[in-house]
Amino acid sequence: MIRNIEKIDKRGWSRERWLQERRKGIGGSEAAAVVGLNPYASPFSVWADKLGKLEEKESTEAMRQGTDLEDYVARRFSEQTGKKIRQSGFMYRNPAYPWALANVDRLIVGEDAGLECKTTSQLNLRKFKNGEFPANYYAQCMHYLAVTGCQRWYLAVLIYSTEFKVFTIERDEDEIKALMDAERDLWQHVQNQTPPETDGSKATTDALSQIYAGTYEDSPVDLTPVKANLARLASLKASVKRLEEGIAAEENAIKRYMGESVYGKTADGWSVSWKAQTRRTFDHKSFLLVHPCADAEDYYKTTKLRQFKINFKEEN
């Protein structure tokens, strides 16, 4: 039973109001990113999003289907478990964690529990072997347990055209503390408008590209404070080059041995294929030579970006 927490009536909210309110705290879908468990977001990208530094992401087909099928997943959960469920028209905020927001899919009637509904592709089926499920789902449910004060959260997952799975996640105070501590730290960065540490994730790379895409400063900046980063980067790139050359050498040795064969295998399970492939590309320069009056401008896609290039100093 949800108790002693703030309930914010979100019924009738417009899309703009929803976006405005979600920037006032960290939601369950962002919890995994805060602790590095979301492959599509990072602490830095969440920070940038909360400060309105990133463009609003366009809804994908997968997102649309997940929203449309939420009610179906909830009904399937009720049919399979016999538990009664209800929707909630509120956004929840717990005074103990004022930065944490909870927009729950369903609540369980007569039980101190809630339900998170998920849909996913067959390509992710391996993530559910042996009773396991993705870590980002776990972080989201633990976030809801922290905010609502409930003792249990159910996770219902529809794997398209393949399986329907139900998991039970019990309240864990140690896990909740670790997650809330991480969220508190990130929210302090949001309030202070100071960026958290960056990582090597694609989400952070994309966020940096968006934030600094439109403005440029021609005068040089003193890079002494990041000299250690430059040295580590140079060392890593050298290591990558050695690894790439080593990989190519091993591949070439195998290719030389295979010769004209397109397939090979070992008695203990290794297999290699080396098949001919054809790739077709559009040669726009040749096209314009043949059709000089053609206007191909509308077929070019323009993307604004900043090229990052380092000239490493020579080592003595």
Image: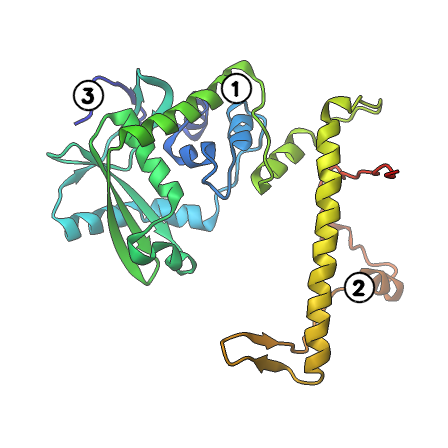
Q: Residue at x 60, y 39 (%)?
A: 200
Q: Is residue 149 left or right of residue 298?
A: left
User: Horizontal and vertical percent for residue 68?
Assistant: 34, 47
Residue 207 occupies which quadrant of the picture? top right
Q: Earlier in the sequence, mark 1 or mark 3?
A: 3
Secondary element at image label 3: loop
Residue carrying label 1: 189
Identify which amino acid the numbered label 1 is placed on. His
Answer above or below: position of 286 versus 182.
below
Q: Residue at x 54, y 74 (%)?
A: 270
Q: Residue at x 50, y 76 (%)?
A: 269
Other-residue count near label 1 (Cα within 10 Å), few / some / many at <14 / 14–19 / ≥20: some
Residue 60's tag is none
Identify which amino acid the numbered label 3 is placed on. Arg
Residue carrying label 2: 283
Secondary element at image label 1: helix
Nearer-the-camera pick, 294 or 231: 231
Q: For marks 1 and 3, give the CA distance.
A: 29 Å
Residue carrying label 3: 3
Identify which amino acid the numbered label 2 is placed on. Asp
Q: For marks 2 and 1, give the CA distance.
A: 48 Å
Other-residue count near label 2 (Cα within 10 Å), few / some / many at <14 / 14–19 / ≥20: few
Residue 159 occupies which quadrant of the picture? bottom left
Tell me, yes or no, if residue 229 can be seen here.
yes
Q: Earlier in the sequence, mark 2 or mark 1?
A: 1
